Structure formats: structure tokens, C-alpha cells
Image (cartoon, rainbow, N blue to C red):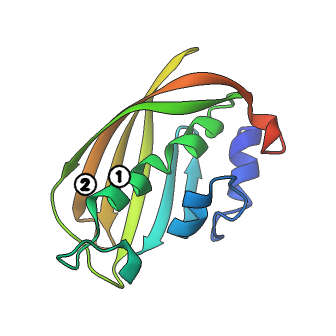
Amino acid sequence: MSKEVEILSQFIGSKLDFVPSKLTRWLNGTLTEVKKGSIVIEYKVTEDMLNPFQVLHGGVIAAMLDDTVGLTIFTSGESYFYTTINLNVDYFSSLKVGDIALAESELIKHGSKVSNLILRLKDSNEKLIAMAHTNLIRTNIPVSKFFPV
């Protein structure tokens, strides 16, 4: 097990309060699984996440999926932050207040400048709610600025 996976594994079952993003803290997800190149975060759909049709807002779905990418790159042992340069989301189903959403990431290619991931949002019964493809670009911001490595 890599040092980074070991560090994140200590937070399994915990809220993501240790992440520097205020959006991450607002989404209020719980880290449920960590492997090299993959994580799972569980979210509970709240009323303030809904669109006018009373289902989980597409923008919140995109945020939940995008929320997984930084920690996923961290599991690869990367020394620098990567930031999203595109996020293409396909929506298949909806969730309502009280439903559980599971955001899963899969690192497809980790490059020295650009990395590629596939993201999935499922409900608690493993039904696919949305799927995304994203590319990230390396920044000059060291991971050690926010995480103990």
C-alpha cells in the first residue's frame, strides 16, 4: 500500500473536513473507499441540493463527481495538485432528498502534465445516476501545502 493510500485510508468513514475546498465541506461527503487510482465518496442528498423539480441538481451531480478527482490523483503519489480542464457528464437518472449518492473515480492515465479519469455516480442500489469523463492538468502547487506527505 502506498504512503498516500495509507494516509487517506485513515479517513475512511470520516467526513472530508480535512480537504481545503469549502465546496467539498458543503457537499458533506464521507470517504468510504480508497485504492491507488480510485476512491469512493458517499453523499446524502439534502434539500438545498435540489433543482426546481425536487431532484438532485445536475450541477451538484457534476460537483460530486469532480470532487473525487483531487483525492484520486493524490492516491497515485503525485507531489503536485492537478486541476480540472474539462468535465463531460452524462445524466441517466435522478435522486431525491434523503437518497444516498456514491461517487466513484477511476484513474485511467496519470501523466506528468495531464491525467484522465472516469467518474460514476450511483445510488445505494448501484444504479448508475451519471457518468463523467475528465482531464486534469498539473499545477505548480505542491500537495504538501495542504496534506501531510
Q: Which residue is mark 1?
A: 62
From the image, state whether disc 1 or disc 2 is nearer to you.
Answer: 1
Q: Which mark is residue 130?
A: 2
State yes or no: discs 1 and 2 in contact (Cβ < 8 Å): yes
Q: Position of residue 3 (x, y in %)?
A: 77, 40
The structure residue drawn at horizontal position 47% and vertical position 67%, both measured from the top left corner, is 42
The vertical placement of 92 against 123, above or below, is above
Above or below 27: residue 111 = above
Q: Position of residue 72 (x, y in %)?
A: 55, 41
Cα separation between marks 1 and 2: 9 Å
Q: Quadrant of the N terminus?
A: top right
Q: Quadrant of residue 23?
A: bottom right
The local secondary structure at tag 1 comes to helix
Is 110 placed above or below 2 here?
Answer: above
Q: Nearer the viewer, residue 99 or 4?
A: 99
How far across and down, in percent of the image, does residue 69 sit?
51, 42
Snapshot quadrant of residue 99 = bottom left
The first of marks 1 and 2 along the sequence is 1
